[in-house]
Amino acid sequence: MRWIAITLLFTGLNMHAAETTLPLSVQNALNTRNVPHNSLSISVVDVDSGESILEWLPQQSRNPASTIKLLTTLVGLDVLGPAYRWRTDIYARGEIVDGRLDGDLAIKGYGDPFLVKERIWQLVQEIRGAGVTHIDGDLLLDDSWFSVGAYDPGAFDRQPLRAYNVAPNALMMNLKVVRYWFENDRANGSVKVRMEPPLENITLDNRLRIGNSSCRGFQRGITITMSESLDEATFTGRFPSGCDVYTMSRTALSHNEFVFGLFSQMWRQSGGGFDGTYRKVVLTEDEDALLSFKSLPLLEIIARINKHSNNVMARQLLYTLAAESSGPPGTEANGKAVISEWLSSNGLASENTRIENGAGLSRQTRTTTSDMTTILSFAWRQPYMPEFLASMSLAGLDGTLRRRFDDSALVGQAHLKTGSLDHVTAISGYLQSRSGRRFAIAAMQNHPDIHRGPGEEAQEALLRWLFEQ
């Protein structure tokens, strides 16, 4: 009887031990593409019981790509709170008489990550509602809440015009990005080019010609060259005759020049008068603001960060954490320190986790799948868990997962953050199985060309296996 009891004891322990062999379906996905099994790490934990379900090289330090945004946004939720709002303060430096401001209009930014043109239109209407319809002076811009220092937008991948490479800024408008529209004007055998928003301080030099080809190819054959001052865009190349319309989003101008061009254009569109220029200033704390324009709440911002993997907004959040926790100006170094201190204070610190910019657009960021599922399990027990969960993409439905798993039983069953760089692919988040069990999951793979498809195949095999547990 004693032997039977001991046997049953060890059998029970084995039933609750984590699986340490890759599921056969995952092995097959890797083998089909000749991808080594040791390029992949996986950790899966039952968030309700805390039971470890699957571990495969869970302590291997890897590049997590954009899945590290889950850590940045989680710290943001915990430190700032789901209802946190950024503000943009407006100051009238002069008397307002019959709607006319006899002086300058000043704008001080506090890092709003989503001050896009629709929101700027609302800001313009609030200023007009406060009694200003004509500005006699200049536009004064204060972005001193952040200190970014020297920043090379082409340092990561030599693509300085890409929207994801925009530098953080405390007074950032429309993510410092314009969208170019290219339209095939078949009647005239030419290509029409327009810009949205139509900024008056950007010049377009259209040298495009029509090429006899189908609508395909990198950037549809279009090359964009910006002047050194980033205020003139030249378009060259052959636009395929098979294309009707094509769009590209690219950065332009400096931050302050962009704010000046966009704000003044929208101010005039509203019927306001303004013929001045702009100056960069630092406003003193003793000035009374004409109004304070509030951002969307943090819980809505992190959904835009995680669902659409917005690198610039994630970096804005990192700098905000620094400014709010350590005092202005917010810096990248202080933002990383806030995350490190938060991990330590919550018993989550690990020598294997290294943050560079909070967005994952980095070759130096590192963590493990074990660390990631530990963080996800912690988040599951917090009162703001629903907001954190809702910030991730739903399998087959929205965000970066809207075109994945859309023909399978996984649709709507997983809230995940994806990550992809050259030679890196990853997923992290939560999945509910067919039986109703809820799992925290992290999978990271670093291997040459793994981002070109093989990584996603292994991820899908893993998620399908887990769904049946």
Image (cartoon, grey):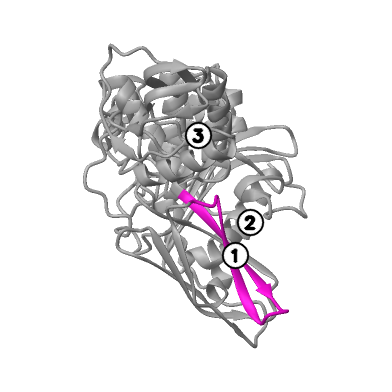
- Which residue is located at x 33 percent, y 31 percent? 140
Residue 16 visible in the snapshot: no
Q: Is residue 363 above or below residue 133?
A: below
Which of 256/366 is in front? 256
Judge the density around disc 3: few (<14), some (14-19), many (≥20) Cα neighbours within 10 Å.
some
- Residue 317 is drawn in which quadrant? top left
Q: Residue furthest left?
A: 150
Judge the density around disc 1: few (<14), some (14-19), many (≥20) Cα neighbours within 10 Å.
many
Q: Secondary structure at mark 3?
A: strand
Question: What's drawn in magenta, residue-wise?
Answer: 177-199
Q: Which residue is mark 3?
A: 273
Q: Which residue is mark 1?
A: 29
- Quarter that holds the N terminus: top right
| Residue mark closest to the camera, 3 vs 2 | 3
Q: Which residue is mark 2?
A: 461
Could you give the CA–CA distance between mark 1 and mark 2, rounded to whole angstroms?
7 Å
Q: Is residue 296 above or below residue 18?
A: above
Q: Position of residue 40 (x, y in %)?
A: 46, 56
Residue 318 lies left or right of residue 216; in this view the side is left
Q: Secondary structure at mark 1?
A: helix
- Which residue is located at x 42 percent, y 53 percent? 201
Could you give the CA–CA distance between mark 3 and mark 1, rounded to whole angstroms?
63 Å
Which of 174/83 is in front? 174
Q: Earlier in the sequence, mark 1 or mark 2?
A: 1
Marks 3 and 2: CB-CB under 8 Å?
A: no
Marks 1 and 2: CB-CB under 8 Å?
A: yes
| Residue mark closest to the camera, 3 vs 1 | 3
Magenta highlight: main SS = strand
